Image (tube, helix red, strand yellow):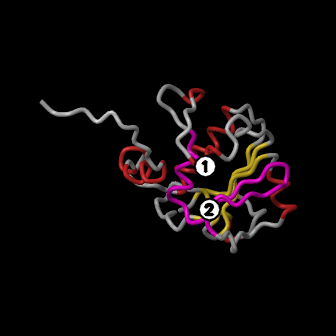
Amino acid sequence: MTESDDRLHVVDPMEVMRRLERTTHWGGRFSAGEAVAHIVQECLLGRAATVSVRHVSDWWVVGADVDWLAQDGDVAFRRIVSYPEAGSNSMRYEVALAAFAEDVLTAFDGAVTRIKGECRSFPFSTDDVRELGRRVVAFRSNNSSNGDEVSGAGGAGPRGTLRPTT
């Protein structure tokens, strides 16, 4: 008979996300396009009427006219948070950004909070961030080669017309 381990085990949510990468992402690995899709879904489930998506260089920015993170705030980036609005066994996707993206930041009413990385190459001004929405989530990822993302037309900068990547 084996002895039961009754001790409490603390797990690192980033480690769990990385370990489960193959089972938690559509293509078996993190992709910027999937991340954007999940965040946009959260905006819409949070009752957003307007959602903005921008892609400049390696940066992806999603903004909405509502604070879809009002209930969970920055905690959604630090641990796995249940998100029943998206269905049973669903979670907020922001923790995956913190686990896999190189840089992550968020803004609420123009006040920017750096979540991960140095965010030195962020190509948007404070005014741009305010224009994108009441709540904004931005991340930089080198993993955007799946062909499932949207891209700024011709590298047109933050206010470029969005079109599917070919």
Determine the residue positioned at 81% across, 58% down. 129
Residues 60 and 6: in front is 6
Magenta-tinted stretch:
92-117
List the residue tagged with mark 2: 116
23 left or right of 57 in image: left
Q: Quadrant of the N terminus?
A: top left
> Residue 98 magenta-drawn?
yes
Which residue is painted at 68% across and 58% down in the image?
105
Left or right of 53? Residue 34 is: left
Specify the farthest residue to the right: 127
Residue 121: quadrant of the picture:
bottom right
Query: Vertical placement of 3 versus 25: above or below?
Result: above
Q: Residue at x 82, y 67 (%)?
A: 125
Residue 55 in the image: x percent, y percent?
A: 66, 62
Which one is in front, 49 or 166? 49
Q: Relative to 15, is 136 on the left or the right?
A: right
Q: Is residue 91 magenta?
A: no
Residue 84 image point, x, y percent: 56, 27
The crowd level at tag 2 (other Cα within 10 Å; few <14, some 14-19, many 20+) is some
Tag shown at residue 77: 1
Q: What is the three-letter code of the residue carrying label 2?
A: Lys
Name which quarter of the figure residue 111 lies in.
bottom right
In front: 164, or 20? Answer: 20
Q: Is residue 13 above or below residue 158?
A: above
Q: Decide which of tag 1 and tag 2 comes sooner along the chain.
A: 1
Task: Report the disc number at residue 113.
Answer: none
Q: Amino acid at mark 1?
A: Phe
Q: Position of residue 139 (x, y in %)?
A: 63, 60
Q: Secondary structure at mark 2?
A: strand
